[in-house]
Structure formats: structure tokens, C-alpha cells
């Protein structure tokens, strides 16, 4: 379901092979269950009917009682659901078959939140708050703001409009949810934010918006099977994971995630977090960045062709886009033209000595999204283990949180 | 109007000074008028009343006859006007005081253009097409698509709904405009796309949307004056331009443009083009990338703190955001909290040995936008001249265009 083309990367078969033993060891370690926060590895196999039924029931309630759902979260709790909805939804209009979904708590802009409140004030609102601890600042602030509005609008019934996705046992949000009687979903304590799409984090908003979450799960399960072989040659995720290690050792310090479809923009943002936060440790790692083509061929195209050659590209492509358009007398439809440009650029950039991975899926649908998230998680984990860093922690984030706390308490 | 804080960059005064002679020479060269495509340098002083009057008149016509304006362009012809409108407009709703503005022709996605057409079909449409040659593929394709719709809706009157911004004399679009009688504006032949904001490219869409374009021009004129001193100490644009050269020589190959305001996202994209396309030549240049905080503190924060230390940050900050919000009992408003986070992160990242430039303006308004675009253009030109590359050409873009053409004609 993902075809990996690495013909333009220039890695010899024996280079890949030299990693085989390490890949085998890393694979076994990853599937051993011994690693902290590795719960996502077996997640596609663990999702059961009753879990999905609870999500469907909650989504049904939300749809019945709301014209607007505000999803509060940051990091993977924002980028995952946002990327999926952008991927599926019409860019320019909302169909009214489901509540309109807005995201908040992913920034601290007063302007953003003022304008959002202004927009939704007269709507029927439900809130989905996603936070393991309940103390993540951005999400907690936005939650306080939204709660105030719910209480003003609905009085004591406000708590029936809050859906909390949080730690099964501990944390401030779990405690509050228990006291106030919010509907809750477990954010498993052994799954980190950037690996959480295949939980209620990704599935509840998708379900509210009217998409088939069983297909998302099916995609992830297919990826689980496809990413199981220990042989590099039989496992595109591992092959790609090894490939980027080899390029890094050749001096490439930037990975440019590219797509020729504007609706993949937040998927690229999600990838930046997945790889950046998993790998950027101990002064190591490849700096992930993203470009949307063909827009950015007219902005960064010059640099990609002739700038400091410290980067490689990973292009995400879909064989069958959702819709197409043309005009009378056109030689090609827009999508056909887009595909020809992609091929031309592949030639031009590889002639410019830029290594390019291309990952191609079939359709732009629920199943592909589920497949890709798991595929990249697996590739990323392998790549990090080969680099010798723990893919599942984020010690550096604590440093900045401590500095912010210092300033806040000094005030 | 822009305050540069480089205390966290760790450059000694004598390091700056060692560039003074070169800066003087580059400044004189830049203002000599000898360089190809340097028309933007004196542009703030050259804009006159009649130029602005023509834009106002065209905007008035567009507003009178349309509920929708579609702006067609790519590169600077897209990113400039898009960045300005994003900067000024409400994120969540349109006020109906002016036509709704959509952008097309900046990508080749069939899905995007299909959904756009579907959305606007029943509206009263005008089209603003921006292309120096008229043959830029993405824009030309979208123009053919939109023209077909205009002709279906308005018959022979279609041409009264087309506003072309193009080369004063030559090119396919100028020719067509003359034949069909479109209203036209000159895209001066000595101003490149990424330096074109202060022409009809930026000003016409801004004016249609109801913003005060004289304030934009005023901002640029203030920047023109502020960026005139040849002394590095007295010219923040040159100081910043020199600073990034020094960091590049220390091995920093990535510049991360950051903002704490989601409405600056496309301004950061515009900066990526300005710097990437101006500087990425002869295997040289700093790879520009962008992050929106605090969102990306929860995605790329780990890498910024502890990843491969090959980057520096340039933070764009505004002292007085447009709006603010709070809830009962809050210690800080959202914007106050946002500002405290910015200060905490500055501490944390500089402790993590990342150099950070901070550029602060007063208000988030038309004048600041005009000021910043010119400020960065001047800083970028200086930085490129010090590196020894021509800031105003883009030879590498031609390479990929040739490859695409080869594939298109082979078909």
C-alpha cells in the first residue's frame, strides 16, 4: 500500500545490507515490549470492537447536540487529528452533515482565540480536550476559556458537553473528569503524543466529522503486517529508515518532506514532529522540514537545485487524488499535469545531486492515512534505534518548560 | 519600527566591524542602479499618487461587480498578497464588506481547483491574474480554467472582470490583455517576484479587501529611510544581514524563522522564498525554514533544544497584537502568557547554544507589514552580496522548468 522508490537515492544494495544485523536487533527490541512508551507498536492489533463502539457512541452524541466541536490539544494531539481532517475534507466548504470542527489550545495567540470565540459564540458547542496530564499550558488555558463559555451557555449541563481524552488513572484532567462526570477516553500511558493517532486522539474527531474509522484502523493493520518482516529488502519502512541513516552519515542534515497536494500540509507537519522529536537528541538527528509543491518550487526550488547541498527529499505521492478538473481543449487534466511536473522535478533534483525518496500510495482515503501514520512511526523508530537515540522520550522539552515556569512564577 | 535584539546571538562588536568596508561597498553597488532587477530598491520613493489612484479605482470596480475575487499567481505573486491578507484578516469569518478573496494557480492539484470552482460557481466573480510572462505554468492553467467560467457566466463581458498584472511591454499576458481589453497594471521588468510586494501585486488585493494601502506604502518608506545608513551599527537590516553571514561561517546552515502568531505563517513562507531563492546558489546559502510557536515547541522543540546544532533562529515578534482574550480569574491574558513563553524559550534555546535574533515591531497593522517586507528585502540583498551571490536571479529554477518541459513535450 506504500511503494518506496529509492532509485534516485543512490544507495548500493551492500550498503543497505551492512545494516541488516542491526535492523534485526532493533526490530526485536522494538517488539519485545521492554521499551518505555512503545505501546503504539502493537496498537493496530489491540484495537477492539468495544473501543470503537464507545467512540462511535460519543461521536453520535456530539453530532446530536452540537453544531460546533472544538478540539483542544497541542503536539500530536493537535497535528494528528488536524492532518487527517485536512486530508479528507473539502478545502472551501463545510457540508453541514456534521458539526464544524475547530482546533484551539495549540497556540497562545489572543487574536486567534478571540476570533474563534467570536465565531462560535452562538453555536451549539461541544469540547474535546486532549491532554495526558491536563497541565499542558496551551491546552489548559484554552480549556478554561471554553469551559467558561459552556457554563455561561448551559449552566450545570456544561459537563455533558465535554469529552476528555486523558491518562487512564493519573493527572489533573482525569481527576476533574471523574469529579464532573465528563465522558472520557483513555490516552494510554505507554503511548506518546506523536504516536497516538490510532487512539481516540485521532479517531474521535474523525468519527465526529463523519469518516469511517474502521477503515483507518484497517489501514494501520495492513501497515502493521507490511512493516513486520525483519529483512530490509522486504520492509519498505525499514529500508527507508536505514536509507535516511546512510544519507545522514554522508553529511545530509536536513530532510525535506514534500507533497504535491495542499491537503497534505498538516501531514507533513505531523511528520516533522514525529521525526524531529524522536530523533533530535544528544546533538544528533536530521532536521525535518516540509515543502508543498508546486507552490514551493517557485520559492525554494532555486535552493533545492543549487543551494548548500546538505539535504535530501522525501516525496509523498498519491496515485489517485480525490477530485480532478480540466478546461475545454486542455491536453492534460490538472492532476495529470501535476504528475508530469513531479516526474520532471525528480529528474531535475536528482541531476542537481539531491537524493530523493518517493513514497506512493493508491488513494487519498481513510485507509491510506491509517497506513501511512503507522508506516512512518515504524520507519522513524527504526531510524532512531540505528542512530542510538531513544525514539520515545523528549528530555529537551522539559528544559524549555522549566524556563517558562521560572518566568511565570517569578512574576 | 523594527527593534533588533541580537544579545542572544553572541557576536562581538569587532566581528560586526570587520564587515563594515564590505557593507559600504555592497550598499553603494545596491543603490547605484547598475544591478539587474534592482528596481525594488528605490520603489518606496517612486510610488506616486496616480499609481495608487489607479489601484483604488480598479479595487472599487472589483468590489462593485463581485462577491468573489480570485487571485492567480505563484511564488512572490502568491505569497506576498496571501501573507498580507492572512496578517490582517479574521481567521474564522469574512465580514462581507468586500468580496471574498481566494487564491489559485499556486498549485496544480485537481482536487484543490475542483473544490474552489464548486465553491465560487454561483458567485459574482472577478479574476486578478499575476504573471510577468503569462507562461508560468500553474498560473496559466488556472487562468484558462477561470476564463472558461467567466465566459460561461458573462459571455463577451468576461473581459471586464479580468485584471492583469504583467510586464509593461512584452510577454503573452500583456499581448492578450491588449487584445481583449483587460485592465492592466505594470509588473516592472526590473523587479523580481519575491521583491514585488510593494507593487500592484501586493497592493491591489490588499485594497480590494478594504485595507489602507497608503499605510503599507508609508511603512515601506519608513523602512527605506531606516535602512539607508551605511554604518552597520545604525542599520538593523544590515546588522542582521551581516549577523547571519557570521553565523553561516560558524557552520550554521539552517535559519529557522519563528513567530508566536498563527497569522504570520505566510509571512514566514514569503521569507523562505526571499532568502532561499536569493541566496541558494553555487552550492552556498542558508536553508530557510519556518516554525509557528507555541505549536511547534511541542513538535520541533526537542530538536531545537538538543538536536544537531546546525541552525539559528530569527523570531518575529509584535508588541501589540490585534486582539486579546482572557477568562475570569486568569493571572494573564492569552497574549501576556504568549509573551512570557517567548521570553522563557529565548532563555532555554540560548542556553541550548542556539543563536536567536529577535525582531520586534509595534503593532500588527498595514504599516508594519510594509515596513517589514522592505526591511527584509534590504537585509537579504546585503547578506547575499556579502556571500558573493547575485540576490536577484534564479538560474536553478530554469533547470527544473527545462526538465518539466522535456517531459511535457515528449508525451
Image (cartoon, coloured by chain):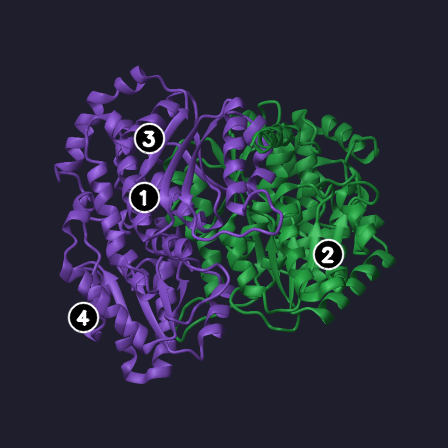
Chain colours: A green, B purple
The Cα–Cα distance between marks 4 and 3, rounded to whole angstroms, is 44 Å
Do circles 3 and 1 both sit on a common chain? yes
Tell if the residue under mark 4 belongs to the same chain as the one under mark 1. Answer: yes
Among numbered discs 4 and 1, the one appearing first in the sequence: 4
Q: Residue at x 73, y 66 (%)?
A: A62
| Identity of the residue drawn at 58% across and 32% down | A404
CA separation in Å, label 3 and label 1 = 13 Å
Report, in whole angstroms, how far the alpha carbon at label 4 lies from the one at label 1: 35 Å
Q: Residues within 10 Å of mark 4 (few under 14, many from 20)?
A: few
Numbered tag placed on residue B200 in the rendering: none
- Give how far across and how far down residue B232 sits, in percent: 25, 26
Q: Which residue is mark 4?
A: B178
Tell me whether circle 4 and circle 2 mark residues in contact (CB < 8 Å).
no
Q: What residue would you read off at disc 3?
A: B240
Q: Are marks 4 and 2 on the same chain?
A: no
* Quarter placement of the C terminus of chain B: bottom left
Q: Position of residue A123 (x, y in %)?
A: 62, 69
Mark 2 = which residue? A203
Q: Pick the quarter of the image with the N terminus of chain B.
A: top left
Question: Crowding near pointer 1: few (<14 within 10 Å), some, many (20+)?
Answer: many
Residue with the mark numbered 1 = B372
The answer to whether dots 1 and 2 both sit on one chain is no
Q: Mark 4 against mark 2, which lies toward the viewer?
A: 2
Q: Secondary structure at mark 3?
A: helix
Q: Position of residue A302 (x, y in %)?
A: 36, 42
> The residue marked by circle 2 belongs to what chain?
A
Sooner in the amino-acid sequence: mark 3 or mark 1: 3
Using the rendered view, name the quadrant where residue A364 is placed: bottom right
Amino acid at each position: 500500500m506504500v511503494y518506496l522508490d529509492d532509485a534516485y537515492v543512490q544507495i548500493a544494495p551492500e550498503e543497505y545490507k551492512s545494516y541488516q544485523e542491526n535492523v534485526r536487533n532493533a526490530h526485536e527490541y522494538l517488539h519485545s515490549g521492554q521499551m518505555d512508551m512503545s505501546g503504539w507498536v502493537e496498537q493496530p492489533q489491540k484495537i477492539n470492537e468495544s473501543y470503537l463502539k464507545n467512540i462511535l457512541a460519543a461521536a453520535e452524541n456530539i453530532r446530536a447536540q452540537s453544531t460546533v466541536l472544538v478540539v483542544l490539544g497541542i503536539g500530536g494531539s493537535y497535528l494528528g487529528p488536524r492532518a487527517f481532517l485536512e486530508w479528507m475534507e473539502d478545502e472551501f466548504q463545510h457540508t453541514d452533515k456534521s458539526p464544524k470542527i475547530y482546533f484551539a489550545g495549540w497556540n497562545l495567540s489572543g487574536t486567534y482565540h478571540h476570533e474563534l470565540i467570536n465565531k462560535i459564540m452562538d453555536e451549539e458547542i461541544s469540547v474535546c480536550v486532549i491532554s495526558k496530564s491536563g497541565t499542558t499550558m496551551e491546552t489548559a488555558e484554552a480549556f478554561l476559556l471554553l469551559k467558561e463559555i459552556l457554563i455561561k451557555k448551559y449552566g450545570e449541563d456544561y459537563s455533558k458537553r465535554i469529552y476528555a481524552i486523558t491518562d487512564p488513572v493519573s493527572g489533573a484532567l482525569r481527576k476533574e473528569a471523574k469529579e464532573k462526570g465528563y465522558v472520557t477516553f483513555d490516552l494510554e500511558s505507554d503511548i506518546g503524543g506523536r504516536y497516538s493517532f490510532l487512539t481516540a486522539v485521532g479517531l474521535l474527531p474523525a468519527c465526529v466529522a463523519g469518516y469511517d474509522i474502521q477503515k483507518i484502523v484497517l489501514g494501520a493493520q495492513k501497515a502493521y503486517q507490511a512493516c513486520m518482516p525483519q529483512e530490509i529488502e522486504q520492509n519498505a519502512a525499514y529500508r527507508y529508515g536505514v536509507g535516511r541513516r546512510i544519507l545522514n552519515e554522508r553529511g545530509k542534515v536536513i530532510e525535506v518532506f514534500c507533497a504535491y497536494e495542499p491537503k497534505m500540509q498538516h501531514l507533513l507537519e505531523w511528520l516533522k514532529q514525529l521525526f524531529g522529536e524522536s530523533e533530535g537528541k544528544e546533538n544528533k538527528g536530521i532536521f525535518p522540514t516540509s515543502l508543498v509543491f508546486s507552490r514551493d518550487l517557485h520559492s525554494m526550488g532555486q535552493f533545492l537545485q543549487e543551494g548548500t547541498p546538505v539535504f535530501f527529499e522525501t516525496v509523498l505521492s498519491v496515485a489517485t487524488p480525490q477530485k480532478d478538473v480540466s478546461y475545454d481543449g486542455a491536453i492534460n487534466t490538472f492532476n495529470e499535469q501535476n504528475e508530469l511536473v513531479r516526474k520532471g522535478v525528480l529528474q531535475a533534483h536528482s541531476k542537481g545531486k539531491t537524493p530523493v525518496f518517493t513514497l506512493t500510495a493508491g488513494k487519498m482515503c481513510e485507509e491510506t492515512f491509517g497506513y501511512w501514520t503507522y508506516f512512518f512511526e515504524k520507519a522513524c523508530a527504526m531510524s532512531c534505534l540505528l542512530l542510538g537515540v531513544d525514539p520515545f522520550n523528549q528530555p529537551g522539552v522539559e528544559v524549555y518548560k522549566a524556563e517558562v515556569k521560572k518566568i511565570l512564577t517569578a512574576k
